[in-house]
Amino acid sequence: MKNRTLFIVIGVILLCCCVVVIAGAVAYPRISKYLNGASSGLQNLNPSVTSTPETASTSQPSETSQPSTGGSSMVPVAGGLGDPTLKADVWVSILAAKSGNGCSDFNGTAIDVVQKPNSKGVWVENWTVNACGTTSVLKVTFTPDPKGGTNYAITSQ
């Protein structure tokens, strides 16, 4: 009787494990597609420069982006030292600030590196933004976070 109960318990555990593995295998492509699609509207998927401050010293990234040809208000222009995710975060912050001023027609036209990463990894970029026909330059200061991320501060010039 004890052996029979033990075999039933082991059988149920194996069945549950098989169900979890199959469900994971079926769900993985959908979850992956969802995660990739959810962030694709915020990133420039084909940036001309994708270096981070850590790799900037070993490669020669473009320090000034090319002017935008109209551009989309949903993605930042190419250039700068941040990776696409960091640039998307900064761009979303800029969009929120500009739309808070009652403007809904804006795009980025250039990102210029004005200070390369110093000994602490801090660097500064000027982001040129056209909002409702008015061009402004925003100073973005990037500061590496001890936990591995990068903090940024945006100020008007």
Image: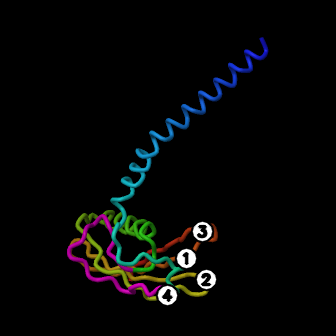
Q: Position of residue 82 (x, y in %)?
A: 45, 75
Find disc 1 in the rendering and name its residue: 143
**Along the line of sight, the residue nearer the viewer: 25 or 133:** 25
Vertical placement of residue 131 versus 31, above or below: below
Label 2: few (<14), some or many (≥20) within 10 Å?
few
Helix, strand or loop under label 4: loop
In the image, taking residue 10 as reference, residue 138 lies left or right, namely left
Q: Which residues are magenta?
A: 59-79
Residue 70 numbered mark, or none: none
- Give whichever of discs 2 and 1 has the lower sequence position: 2
Q: Nearer the viewer, residue 127 or 82?
A: 82
Q: CA distance from mark 3 to mark 4?
A: 19 Å
* Kind of residue at disc 2: Lys
Amino acid type of the residue tagged 1 in the rendering: Thr
**Position of residue 70 measured from the top left corner of the image (x, y, whole percent):** 20, 73
Which labelled disc corresponds to residue 120? 2
Instruction: Give, as a three-letter code, the residue at label 4.
Output: Lys
The N terminus, quarter of image: top right
Q: Which residue is mark 4?
A: 116
| Mark 4 crowd level (few <14, some 14–19, many ≥20, 10 Å Cα) | some
Does the magenta segment cover residue 62? yes
Mark 3 highlights which residue? 148
